[in-house]
Image (tube, rainbow, N blue to C red):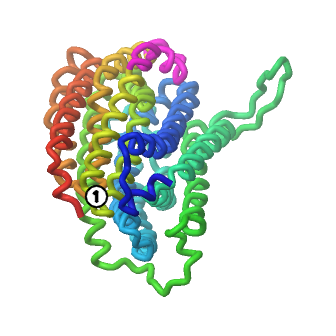
């Protein structure tokens, strides 16, 4: 395999580097797109229940991203170390880190879940939600935070497999998760009803749980996927399958491993908290604009993921390629992979931005039959389409820097950009321009953020700040 040439020190031609980037990016992009499809499925199914259920989900969605992102960031501190170990052909150390990561991440996620459960009921009121949508919003949030420990195992398993160079298994399992989400949501959201297929009337059983059914369906799909992800990692993955190797090694976290994990994860976690805090602040700015604006904003955020999820897939490939090159002490190769992956991300997301601009109204119509929501969301998406190339630069360049363990300054760049540019602009423009003003502020901020990440990538300073 081409990726083995990184570890063996063999020369990789430019064509081989491109091929390897494409090989790793494609499954990761499919995995991210399947995750995006889950958001579409939830949004579309809940959207057909009416504006209030849609607003309830949209109100707490950014808060859920905060909790999910914190747990995901913690797993990256261990995954990057495993990538470096594999790059150095030290699989014994990789397995030791994996064992310790399982316990450490479970313990951390239990604490985060407890905090989330404690604030689930008052949270929608803090966010300025109307009384009619707060109960559904609280229930939706509570289901997801209670399942966080198992979600974290999904993040850990997928991250470890990808950092070892295995993109296919996480990709396939994420597609499976998408299929399960459709099935579970279809059965749990809607009541028993008659449907016509090819002129034949069938009775479709359903629980009729509404917003609660959407949360339970998605959580169940992700939990099943988490079990399969950890099975492949611990029992099947070459070099990391701890169940196949008889080693007298403890699962108890060691300080040295934790220290390095903290060096990577702590800035990422802080950055995510601050960024999601800003996104929650934007939700508070949008809330006074009314239920239609809240629902349109939430649906537009989901729809925009069609553009940026491929960028996150390429970013994951970048983390793997740069991480293994850095672990193998091949900094020049790590830098070349940084340039290639960032360029590929910008090209891909530029194309997706053009598609989104053209089909914005059609995409919104898939998620809501309400004309006001469709019109507001489509306007927002067309504004955002212009930011996609530079948004890609920030996403993929960040993944490149994570690959070497450089997370402090990139984290500062991320949260400084969103708090110093997006939030003030959104607060200034929203009263006069409405939801369009909020999304114009987002567009300007993403272009600025992409520019500063490109500057740092080209400077090469990130190579000197790794683990």
Identify whether 361 is placed above or below 146. above
Q: Is residue 370 magenta?
A: yes
- Counting every numbered tag in the picture gives 1
Q: Is residue 371 magenta?
A: yes
Judge from the rendering whether residue 125 lies leftward or rightward of residue 179; answer left or right.
Answer: left
Examine the rendering and report whether any part of residue 199 can be seen: yes
Query: What is the x, y in percent for residue 327?
Result: 32, 63
Query: What is the x, y in percent for residue 297?
Result: 37, 26
Give the quarter of the image for residue 286. top left
Residue in view at x 42 percent, y 20 percent: 356
Q: Nearer the viewer, residue 356 or 371?
A: 356
Q: Nearer the viewer, residue 204 or 383?
A: 383
Q: Please name the predominant secondary structure of the magenta segment in the image.
A: helix
Query: What is the x, y in percent for residue 418?
Result: 21, 37
Look at mark 1 in the image and give the residue it sits on.
Answer: 330
Give the quarter of the image for residue 256. bottom left
Residue in view at x 36 percent, y 53 percent: 11
Judge from the rendering whether residue 85 lies leftward or rightward of residue 334; answer left or right.
Answer: right
Residue in view at x 36 percent, y 68 percent: 88
Examine the rendering and report whether any part of residue 67 can be seen: no
Identify whether 89 is placed above or below 60. below
Judge from the rendering whether residue 427 lies leftward or rightward of residue 205; answer left or right.
Answer: left
Which segment is the magenta one? Answer: 354-372
């Amino acid at each position: 395999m081409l990726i083995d040439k990184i570890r063996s020190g063999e020369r990789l031609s430019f064509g081989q580097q491109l091929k390897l980037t494409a090989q790793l990016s494609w499954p990761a992009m499919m995995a991210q797109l399947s995750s995006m499809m889950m958001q579409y499925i939830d949004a579309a199914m809940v959207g057909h229940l009416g504006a209030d259920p849609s607003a309830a989900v949209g109100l707490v969605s950014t808060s859920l991203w905060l909790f999910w992102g914190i747990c995901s960031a913690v797993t990256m501190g261990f995954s990057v170390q495993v990538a470096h170990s594999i790059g150095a052909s030290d699989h014994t150390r990789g397995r030791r880190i994996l064992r310790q990561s399982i316990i450490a991440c479970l313990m951390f996620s239990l604490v985060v879940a407890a905090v989330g459960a404690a604030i689930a009921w008052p949270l929608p009121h803090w966010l300025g939600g109307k009384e009619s949508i707060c109960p559904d919003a609280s229930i939706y949030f509570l289901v997801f935070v209670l399942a966080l420990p198992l979600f974290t195992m999904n993040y850990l398993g997928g991250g470890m497999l990808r950092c070892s160079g295995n993109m296919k298994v996480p990709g396939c399992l994420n597609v499976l998760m998408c299929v399960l989400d459709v099935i579970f949501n279809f059965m749990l959201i809607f009541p028993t009803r008659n449907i016509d297929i090819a002129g034949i009337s069938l009775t479709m059983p359903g629980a009729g749980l509404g917003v609660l059914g959407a949360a339970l369906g998605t959580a169940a799909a992700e939990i099943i996927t988490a079990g399969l992800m950890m099975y492949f990692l611990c029992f099947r993955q070459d070099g990391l399958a701890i169940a196949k190797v008889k080693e007298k090694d403890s699962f108890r976290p060691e300080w040295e491993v934790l220290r390095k994990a903290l060096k990577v994860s702590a800035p990422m976690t802080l950055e995510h908290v601050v960024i999601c805090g800003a996104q929650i602040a934007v939700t508070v700015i949008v809330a006074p604009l009314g239920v239609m604006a809240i629902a349109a904003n939430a649906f537009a955020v989901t729809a925009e993921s069609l553009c940026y999820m491929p960028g996150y897939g390429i970013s994951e490939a970048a983390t793997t390629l740069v991480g293994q090159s850095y672990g193998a002490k091949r900094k020049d190769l790590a830098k070349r992979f940084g340039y290639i992956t960032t360029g590929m991300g910008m090209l891909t997301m530029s194309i997706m931005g053009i598609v989104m601009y053209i089909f914005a109204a059609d995409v919104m119509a898939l998620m809501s039959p309400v004309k006001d929501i469709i019109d507001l969301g489509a306007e927002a998406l067309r504004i955002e389409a212009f930011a996609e190339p530079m948004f890609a630069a920030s996403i993929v360049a960040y993944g490149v820097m994570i690959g070497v363990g450089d997370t402090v300054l990139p984290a500062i760049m991320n949260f400084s950009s969103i708090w110093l540019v997006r939030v003030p602009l959104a607060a200034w423009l929203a009263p006069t321009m409405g939801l369009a003003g909020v999304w114009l502020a987002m567009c300007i901020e993403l272009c600025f953020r992409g520019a500063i990440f490109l500057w740092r990538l080209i400077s090469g300073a990130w190579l000197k700040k790794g683990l």
